[in-house]
Image (spheres, rainbow, N blue to C red):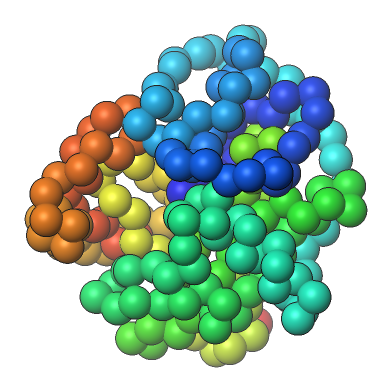
């Protein structure tokens, strides 16, 4: 997942740009509302009294249907530039995954793409449009993923996170995930060098987090 619901939306949510340009915006500035690519995003530490107000929306999650394909392609294009995701030593195509979409006030807000992998349910991609971050969309998608693992009789949900993406590490750990393993240098080897990621941190390693689920 590049992008969680940890950021603050502007007053008007804008889920899709008319033209997607690189680098792709994945976060939103809590102060001015500017959409930011990973390399330009920065962390800020605040107390509870100065957390931005959370906008209230009518939120729903549901399994994706054929009519959602264009929206899923669009959000993948904005988050990744493609629909293929490399994780857990494999290449997944989001369009071939078990997808769950989130809608905020009736508008497409985010998606979680799921696939079975080595006995667990892998989160191949969880992404939320910057304009809908900070509204609980990512949290709702994680809980939907955990429920899907229960329905499929799988013991856990897992996700792969690059070493640079500190907001994503925080997001998943707040939702019950713990570090299960990591592959040192995997991403740098894959891309041929340690490219700058979140806040300019070099992307080198793949951390794998896991959250057991309780069966009924």
Q: Quadrant of residue 149?
A: bottom right
Compared to 56, does 90 lie above or below? below
Going 75% across and 37% down the picture, which residue do you hit? 14
Number of numbered discs = 0
Side of 195 where 193 appears, left or right:
left
User: The C terminus is located in which quarter?
Assistant: bottom right
Q: Position of residue 96 (x, y in %)?
A: 54, 83
Side of 19 where 4 appears, left or right:
left
Q: Position of residue 110 (x, y in %)?
A: 67, 55
Q: Position of residue 88 (x, y in %)?
A: 29, 72
Going 77% across and 35% down the picture, which residue do you hit? 13
Compared to 80, does 145 lie above or below? below
- Closer to the camera, 122 or 177? 122
Compared to 92, does 123 lie above or below? above
Going 34% across and 77% down the picture, which residue do you hit? 91
- Residue ranking furthest to the front: 19
- Closer to the camera, 26 or 172? 26
- Residue 93 visible here: yes
Side of 127 where 164 appears, left or right:
left
- Closer to the camera, 179 or 106? 106
Side of 34 where 59 appears, left or right:
right
Going 21% across and 63% down the picture, which residue do you hit? 181
Q: Position of residue 19 (x, y in %)?
A: 63, 44
- Residue 175 visible here: no
């Amino acid at each position: 997942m590049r992008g969680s619901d940890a950021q603050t939306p502007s007053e008007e949510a804008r889920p899709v740009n008319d033209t997607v340009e690189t680098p792709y915006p994945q976060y939103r500035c809590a102060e001015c509302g500017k959409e930011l690519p990973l390399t330009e995003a920065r962390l800020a530490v605040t107390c509870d009294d100065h957390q931005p107000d959370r906008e209230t929306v009518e939120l729903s999650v549901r399994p994706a249907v054929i009519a959602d394909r264009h929206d899923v392609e669009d959000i993948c294009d904005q988050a990744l530039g493609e629909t293929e995701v490399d994780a857990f030593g494999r290449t997944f195509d989001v369009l071939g995954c078990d997808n769950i979409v989130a809608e905020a006030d009736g508008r497409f807000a985010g998606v979680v793409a799921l696939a079975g992998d080595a006995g667990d349910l892998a989160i191949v991609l969880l992404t939320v449009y910057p304009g809908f971050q900070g509204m609980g969309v990512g949290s709702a998608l994680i809980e939907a993923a955990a429920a899907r693992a229960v329905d499929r009789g799988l013991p856990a949900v897992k996700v792969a996170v690059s070493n640079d993406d500190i907001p994503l590490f925080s997001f998943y750990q707040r939702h019950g995930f713990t570090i299960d393993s990591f592959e040192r240098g995997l991403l740098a080897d894959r891309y041929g060098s340690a490219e700058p990621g979140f806040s300019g941190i070099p992307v080198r390693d793949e951390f794998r987090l896991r959250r057991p689920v309780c069966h009924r």
